[in-house]
Structures are given as structure tokens and as C-alpha cells.
Image (cartoon, coloured by chain):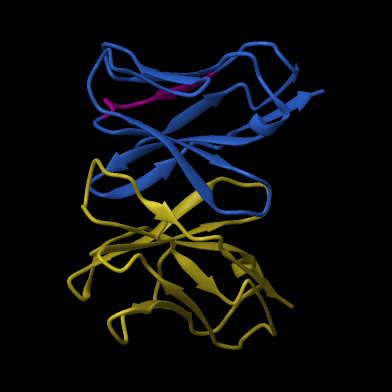
Chain colours: A yellow, B blue
Amino acid sequence: EPEVTQTPSHQVTQMGQEVILRCVPISNHLYFYWYRQILGQKVEFLVSFYNNEISEKSEIFDDQFSVERPDGSNFTLKIRSTKLEDSAMYFCASSDSSSYNEQFFGPGTRLTVL
Amino acid sequence: SQELEQSPQSLIVQEGKNLTINCTSSKTLYGLYWYKQKYGEGLIFLMMLQKGGEEKSHEKITAKLDEKKQQSSLHITASQPSHAGIYLCGADRRGDMRFGAGTRLTVKP
């Protein structure tokens, strides 16, 4: 069964460093998403991406964040200058439709900022 | 923004017992999703409801969306330890998902 994969599973970084979180969505999906979950808190939407551009973003997704689909398979989330409060699980998801359809989630990347 | 309130926040039940988790929205729901999350892992899709009054079942889990489309319930019959986890309801808002805070379910053998 096709699945969304994410690498790395755990990333530790120093405050102020840049990190890139990688996702491989399901191959025939066209809509891609990033979510984050701070420990003990709810899953929060960050951004959705379609046709090589951002379709929606939340108030969390500020200028330090960017997303890219560098090739036909990868979808990345870059955090330019990490802060302590960026420590969280980051989930990638993909779907074959923009609405009213199942989003398939990856296993997540745990980001720890020291 | 759409707020989803889930209740209870946590639930401990004895194996074999039935249970219900509720999700209430501050706005009309156009797509209501139930996901399950095991600690430290990704989200597993359970069910999606769109129409008022709709009810779906999968194995021992049944989800309903009320007629006014502002509340959904998830019912588990004869709970098992494998049902343990965090149950999240999500509302579809133009393709992005907004989640409730989750209900942590513990099933005691």
C-alpha cells in the first residue's frame, strides 16, 4: 500500500541553524501539506501546496518557513533560523483532492532545537 | 477560524466496554474527519463524514455527523487494547485540516 515517507525521523539542531525536513508524498497525489504538533498540544496546520505554489498557510507559517517541491517526488519544509519553540513533530500529508478527501499522513519528523 | 472541541480529553475504559467521543464545532462542518494517533506516530485515517445525519462504521468503530452538522460522535463497541491511542477530529477548511485537541483513550485489559 502506498504511503507517505518522511526523513529524518529525528533531527537535532542548534538554535539559529537552518533545517530541511523532507517528505515523499504518495506518487499520484497532487496536494501536499505540512502540519506540526508541539509536545502535548494539538496538530496544527502550517501550509498546503498545489501546482508548485502555496495554496493556504496559517499564521504560524511566517517568513522563517518555506516549502519547495524540488523534483517530482520530494516535498520539503525549510526552517531558516530555528528557535527553541520550533521543537515539535512535523507531519507531511498528501491527498489526491483539495477537499473532502482523505489526507494520508507520514510518520513525522521530530525536530529538537537546542 | 473554526474551533473544534473534543470531549472528553481523556478516557480510561475496561476492555470490552463501549465508549463515545464527541467533537463539537463552532461552525457548520462541511467535511468531518476522524483520525487516530498513537503516541509519537503519524495520523491514521478512520472515517470521513460529509452529510448531515451520515453514519459510517468500520469494524467496531462508528462515527456520526448530526443533522445540523456541528457535532460528530465516535463510538467504539467492545473496546480492545488495540483501540488505545489519541482520537482526533478534523474539519476540512478549503483543503486544509484543522484538528481538535484529541481524546486520549486508554483501554485496560
Task: Tell which residue pokes out farthest to the left in this image.
Answer: A51
Image quarter hosting the N terminus of chain A: bottom left
Say whether residue B23 is magenta: yes
Q: Position of residue A68 (x, y in %)?
A: 33, 80
| Residue at (49% x, 28% y) in the render | B5
Q: Position of residue A89 (x, y in %)?
A: 60, 62
Bounds of the magenta segment: B21-29
Q: Position of residue A43 (x, y in %)?
A: 52, 49
- Relative horizontal placement of residue A86, taking residue B63 as reference (left or right): right
In this picture, is A43 found above or below A32?
A: above
| Residue at (67% x, 82% y) in the render | A15
Task: Tell which residue pokes out farthest to the right in this image.
Answer: B109
In this picture, is A75 found above or below A108?
A: below
- The one nearer the camera, B67 or A86, is B67
Residue A16 lies in quadrant: bottom right
| Residue at (32% x, 86% y) in the render | A70
Q: Position of residue A30 (x, y in %)?
A: 23, 64
- Relative horizontal placement of residue B70, taking residue B102 as reference (left or right): left
Image quarter hosting the C terminus of chain A: bottom right
In this picture, is B98 found above or below B68?
A: below
